[in-house]
Image (cartoon, grey):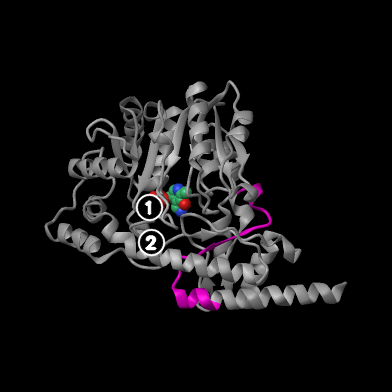
């Protein structure tokens, strides 16, 4: 059978995730130190796991409301208000989802008509452009640059706005750069959203993981923004809960309602045991992740220093748990660099172009990895960079 004619054109044309493609090479190799996958090295804190076990012991194995447990939505409302100083009604403005991944997907499907344009920034998380295309939208890329610490410049956003623009999608701190937004630039982007009557999606999945005593500010906090913002957040990163598949969207009631319609038909609800775990996570709040955050900050300091020492210029990111060193001085492409590092030294990093064209010349290293492994990985990477430089010098 000729499957190309049987498959949806929309899906046929989608590229596979560059991260997953790269990690097919790593699967089954026990000798590899992986700085590749973006998840915490520690399991979910024990009291959170225990809450899920308790719920299973009680036989809580049913569906929940499509919206998610009311107790969880109340806890989300309080947690979000505490983080962002914005209040959401648990009954009408919050939807519990299967991770931020689902929340993003249904948010696009809820608002886009074919041909609507979405402005987003690259380098970015691999699902951004595909999520827009799967909802028949048109992705419009604005690059973030190292010279601006990978912040999004309002002037660049303004140039990308057309009469077809419907959504601006933000993710700060950013995967893969760790970049954060200076408040004055964020405020200007908020003003653009209001001026051009745009919707804003803000993916806050790394907002708890900030360093150097920074305080997070979300675009939703600026005047005129709550009514036009879909705030996406979840448990995967700060609470080390990637496998639980739990997230949420906070949005004005009509937007939440549209998202809920899609969610109820395609997902029904998030798993009840994950929701019970999430409730416990929010009860604990920062107490659940502050130790991890501090440890990531130390690891960030170590990794940034080591990369710069070996001559790979590395910007010091303000948040998340990634560094994005510039590897252009080696004369290799991102992919050549990453493949060579894997083959010669058994260390896995992700080529920067997996996160968009703007990521070429960089690689992403996730430092939510055990400190002793990070030390080994940095030593091996330094050896690799020296070897490459020596080989280049000999060839000249
Ligand atoms: N957004 C960003 C920016 C991410 O980095 C990730 C995961 N790597 C997600 C969303 C997906 O998160 P979740 O596990 O909540 O689906």
Q: Residue furthest right?
A: 396
Query: For residue 293, which numbered disc appears in the image?
Result: 2
Quarter of the image with the C terminus is: bottom right
Q: Which residue lies furthest to the left in this view?
A: 58
Q: How many marks?
A: 2
Specify few, some or many for label 1: CA neighbours under 10 Å numbering under 14, 14-19, or 20 or more.
Answer: many
**Looking at the image, which residue is at 55% across and 53% down?**
177
Q: Depth check: 312 or 201 in front? A: 312
**Looking at the image, which residue is at 49% across and 62% down?**
37
The answer, for residue 135, to whether it is visible in the render is no
Query: How far is mark 2 from mark 1, CA to CA?
Result: 8 Å
Q: Depth check: 319 or 347 in front? A: 319
Whole-percent x and y of residue 198?
Answer: 48, 26
Whole-percent x and y of residue 381?
Answer: 62, 73
Magenta stretch, residue numbers: 356-376
Query: For residue 208, which numbered disc appears in the image?
Result: 1
Specify few, some or many for label 2: CA neighbours under 10 Å numbering under 14, 14-19, or 20 or more.
Answer: many
Query: For residue 30, which numbered disc appears in the image?
Result: none
**Looking at the image, which residue is at 28% across and 64% down?**
45
Asked if the residue under mark 1 is in contact with the one under mark 2, i.e. CB atoms within 8 Å, the reply is yes
Whole-percent x and y of residue 49?
Answer: 24, 63
């Amino acid at each position: 059978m000729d499957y190309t004619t049987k498959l949806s054109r929309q899906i046929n044309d989608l590229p596979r995730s560059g991260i997953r493609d790269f990690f097919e090479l790593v699967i089954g190799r026990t000798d590899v130190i992986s700085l590749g996958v973006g998840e915490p090295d520690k399991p979910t804190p024990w009291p959170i796991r225990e809450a899920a076990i308790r719920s299973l012991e009680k036989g809580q194995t049913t569906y929940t409301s499509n919206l998610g447990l009311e107790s969880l939505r109340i806890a989300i409302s309080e947690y979000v208000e505490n983080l962002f100083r914005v209040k959401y009604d648990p009954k009408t403005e919050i939807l519990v989802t299967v991770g931020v991944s689902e929340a993003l997907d249904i948010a696009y499907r809820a608002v886009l008509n074919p041909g609507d344009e979405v402005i987003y920034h690259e380098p970015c998380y691999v699902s951004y452009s595909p999520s827009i295309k799967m909802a028949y939208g048109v992705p419009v890329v604005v690059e973030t640059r190292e010279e601006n610490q990978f912040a999004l410049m309002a002037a660049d956003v303004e140039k990308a706005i057309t009469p077809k623009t419907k959504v601006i999608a933000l993710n700060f701190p950013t995967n893969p750069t760790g970049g954060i937004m200076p408040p004055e630039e964020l405020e200007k982007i908020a003003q653009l959203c209001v001026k051009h009557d745009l919707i804003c999606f803000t993916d806050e999945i790394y907002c708890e993981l900030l360093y150097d005593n920074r305080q997070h500010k979300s675009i939703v906090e600026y005047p005129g923004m709550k009514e036009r913002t879909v705030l996406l957040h979840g448990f995967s990163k700060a609470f080390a809960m990637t496998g639980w598949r739990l997230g949420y969207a906070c949005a004005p009631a009509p937007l939440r309602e549209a998202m809920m319609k899609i969610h109820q038909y395609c997902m029904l609800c998030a798993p009840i045991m994950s929701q019970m775990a999430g409730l416990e996570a929010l009860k604990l709040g920062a107490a659940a992740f502050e130790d991890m955050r501090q440890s990531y900050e130390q690891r960030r300091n170590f990794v940034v220093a080591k990369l710069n020492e070996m001559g790979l210029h590395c910007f010091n990111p303000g948040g998340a748990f990634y560094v994005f060193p510039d590897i252009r001085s080696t004369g290799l492409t991102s992919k050549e660099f990453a493949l060579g590092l894997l083959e010669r030294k058994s260390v896995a990093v992700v080529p920067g172009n997996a996160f968009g064209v703007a990521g070429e010349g960089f690689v992403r290293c996730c430092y939510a990895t055990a400190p002793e492994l990070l030390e080994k990985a940095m030593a091996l990477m330094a050896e690799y960079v020296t070897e490459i430089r020596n080989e280049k010098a000999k060839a000249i």
